Image: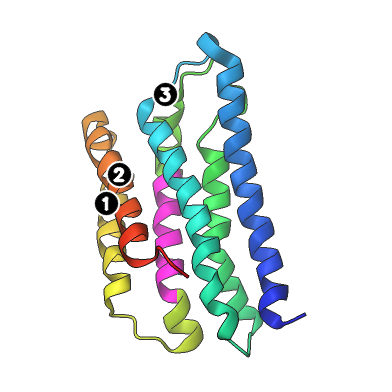
Amino acid sequence: MSHFEFIMIMLSIIVGLGVSILLTNVARQIKAGTNCKPYWVQSIITLTIFIGLLQQWWESWDLQVVDSWTFPIVLVMLAGPIGLFILSHLLFPEELDGADLQQHYFMASKGIWGIAMMVVIASTLFRPLAFAYTLIDWDNAASIGLLFVFGVLFLSNNKSVHQLLVPLLFTAVVSDILIFNSTI
């Protein structure tokens, strides 16, 4: 077993658990039916985190050429998937029966967007710190925009701001994946 395969097992477990949490909670929401008041912004964030988890796994394939790994490098690499795993938990209340997902979202929004900022920072710094890649490059340009949007969402309790920025965020994330990272 190569170092890459060994490390990918842990990354895949974390990504798989995050995907499992999201899918389980969506199924729980469907089961709750009319006893759970959905919120479309929370649904878009759920889909964005799902795609983000898959993207973390997808982009990790390029790391198979890395011969040497250190524990700190592995920790930085896993910070993104771990953050997305935590976000998967924060998006849904423990009890969905009778839940108002809009109310839950705004109660959890500071934690959601604070962790989202940390995920972007860790994911952006991973390759420059671990492998001496340049920090300023086209692939990292989107990170500046994401940090700004996440910061605005972190600071704002205005529903209109969230309803405007979250769909734009989703569009940006999907566009970034399709334009810059669609193949391995």
118 within the magenta span: yes
| Residue visible at 45% across and 36% down in the picture | 108
Q: Which residue is mark 2?
A: 153
Kind of residue indicated by mark 2: Leu
> Can I make out residue 158 in this image?
yes
Does 155 appear above or below 173? Answer: above
Residues at badges 1 and 2 in contact (C-beta under 8 Å)?
yes
* Residue 156 located left or right of residue 15: left
* Residue 86 located left or right of residue 6: left
Looking at this view, name the residue that lies furthest to the top. Answer: 34
In the image, the segment drawn in magenta is 112-125
Badge 2 density bin: few <14, some 14–19, many ≥20, Cα 10 Å: many
Q: Which residue is mark 3?
A: 103
Q: Nearer the viewer, residue 141 or 90?
A: 141
26 within the magenta span: no
Badge 3 density bin: few <14, some 14–19, many ≥20, Cα 10 Å: few
Q: Which mark is residue 149?
A: 1
Q: What is the chief secondary structure element of the magenta stretch?
A: helix
- Could you say which quadrant of the image residue 48 lies in? top left
Q: Position of residue 142 (x, y in %)?
A: 28, 64
Residues at badges 3 and 2 in contact (C-beta under 8 Å)?
no
